[in-house]
Image: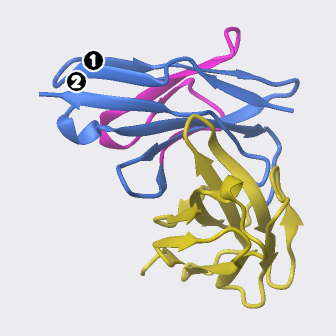
Chain colours: A yellow, B blue
């Protein structure tokens, strides 16, 4: 199993450009999440999905959109990138259980917005 | 709402020395507690978690943590560290009774552990 994979690994954008980050998981997990990690800030939840066709806002959703058209994929879009969106983006997935399930993380995407 | 405070942003230690990474939390409800580890240029992976039962929890790679409800703490310890333990460690909490996913998981800001030879 590949687990959770993210594409691309690194990207440089100019202010105002758009891009899509792709997350894929092969563990048949219901839940998927997008986080951003900034120095000294820990991880902050951007959006999450509880299943195919559903999405919900997390702590810092502004400037981002997501889609979950297939159970195994979760896409994060930036319509008009801003320098404040320079960050490392992590995707994660987890089972739906009766208690808090372990999150499995991808390797991250480093985004630089100039 | 929950919050997590990791008291040390950086902890340098020598190889084979013991280490303690401190985590305190604030919550109006009971919580589940986690420690995740992030090795350089990798995603996070679960180190250990406390859900119920014994307050001393053992995790992977020789790490353990102790839940102290009165002090609202969940400190991570290892009696003898290796160079390979160099990583960033994140404490996280979620409300007890959480069902389904982990969308309510709140992470601390992380502690960078550097193990020197």
- Pinpoint the chain carrying mark 1: B
Percent position of residue B88, x then y: 43, 39
Q: Is the residue A5 above or below the residue B82 in the image?
A: below
Dividing the image into 4 quarters, which one contains the C terminus of chain A?
bottom right
Which residue is identified by label 1? Answer: B18
Are discs 1 and 2 less than 8 Å apart at CB? yes
SS assignment at label 2: loop
**First to last magenta residue range:** B46-75
Q: Is the residue A42 above or below the residue B55 in the image?
A: below
Q: Is the residue A38 above or below the residue B78 in the image?
A: below
| Frontmost residue, B108 versus A40 | A40
The residue at the point 59 percent across, 45 percent down is A38
Question: Which quadrant of the structure image shows residue B84?
Answer: top left
Q: Is residue A48 left or right of residue B109?
A: right
Residue B67 seen anywhere in this rendered image of the structure: no
Which residue is identified by label 2? Answer: B80
How many numbered badges does the structure rendering display?
Answer: 2
Dividing the image into 4 quarters, which one contains the N terminus of chain A?
bottom left
């Amino acid at each position: 199993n590949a687990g959770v994979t993210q594409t691309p690994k690194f990207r440089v954008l100019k202010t105002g450009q758009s891009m899509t980050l792709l997350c894929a998981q092969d563990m048949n997990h219901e839940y998927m999440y997008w986080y951003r990690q900034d120095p000294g800030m820990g991880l902050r939840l951007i959006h999450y999905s509880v299943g195919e066709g559903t999405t919900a806002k997390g702590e810092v959703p502004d400037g981002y959109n997501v889609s979950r058209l297939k159970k195994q994929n979760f896409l994060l879009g930036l319509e008009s990138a801003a320098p404040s969106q320079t960050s490392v983006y992590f995707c994660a997935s987890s089972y739906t259980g009766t208690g808090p399930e372990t999150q499995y993380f991808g390797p991250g995407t480093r985004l630089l917005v100039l | 709402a929950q919050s997590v405070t990791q008291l040390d942003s950086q902890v340098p230690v020598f190889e084979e020395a013991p280490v303690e990474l401190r985590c305190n939390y604030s919550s109006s409800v009971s919580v589940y507690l986690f420690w995740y580890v992030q090795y350089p240029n990798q995603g996070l992976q679960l180190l250990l978690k406390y859900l119920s039962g014994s307050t001393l929890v053992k995790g992977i790679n020789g790490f353990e943590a102790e839940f102290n409800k009165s002090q609202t703490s969940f400190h991570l310890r290892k009696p003898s560290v290796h160079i390979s333990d160099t990583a960033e460690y994140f404490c996280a909490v979620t409300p007890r009774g959480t069902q389904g996913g982990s969308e309510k998981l709140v992470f601390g800001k992380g502690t960078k552990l550097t193990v020197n030879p």
